[in-house]
Image (tube, rainbow, N blue to C red):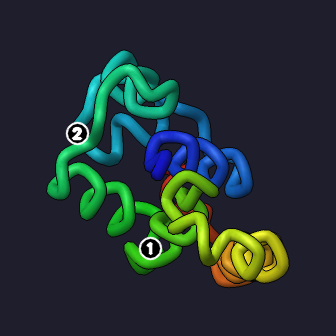
């Protein structure tokens, strides 16, 4: 599971800079960068903060973060068929729910 990559994907989908998101989450931009690149693993508290700031359920982060290696080999065929659609839907929900997410950018 790549939580950092999921955070980055969602942040970019919402056109929010690393600096803006880090500031809203009370993180340094360096820490957020390290999370997004996989150098540092975010704590549950950090994941909760990011989700609260982005106004998304944590489940969206976990869906987007899922990787083939997270799935047992016996289920990978189903994963390959279903996951791309589920990930796409999760990202569409983020963008459609957050079209007016001006407060994160404007504050």
Pointer 1 with pointer 2, Cβ within 8 A? no
Which residue shows up at 42% across the image and 80% down it?
A: 57
Which secondary structure lies at badge 1?
loop
Residue on which the image places disc 2: 26
Compare residues 98 and 48 and report the one nearer the observer: 48
- Residue 100, image x, y percentages: 67, 73
User: On the image, which quarter does residue 14 sit in?
Assistant: bottom right
Residue on which the image places disc 1: 55
Which secondary structure lies at badge 2?
loop
Q: Could you give the CA–CA distance between mark 1 and mark 2, rounded to whole angstroms?
A: 16 Å
Task: Count neighbours of disc 1 (C-alpha within 10 A) and say few if under 14, some if 14 to 19, many if 20 or more.
Answer: some
Compare residues 104 and 18 and report the one nearer the observer: 18
Which dot marks residue 71?
A: none
Mark nearer the N terminus (1 vs 2): 2
Residue 26 shows in this picture: yes
- Residue 29, image x, y percentages: 39, 22
Residue 95 shows in this picture: no
């Amino acid at each position: 599971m790549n939580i950092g990559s999921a955070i980055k994907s969602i942040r970019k989908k919402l056109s929010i800079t690393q600096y803006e998101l880090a500031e809203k989450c009370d993180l340094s931009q360096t820490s957020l960068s390290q999370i997004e690149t996989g150098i540092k693993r975010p704590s549950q508290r950090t994941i909760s903060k990011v989700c609260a700031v982005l106004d998304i359920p944590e489940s969206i982060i976990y869906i987007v973060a899922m990787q083939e290696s997270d799935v047992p080999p016996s289920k990978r065929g189903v994963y390959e068929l279903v996951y791309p659609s589920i990930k796409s839907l999760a990202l569409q929900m983020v963008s459609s729910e957050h079209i007016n997410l001006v407060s994160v950018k404007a504050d």
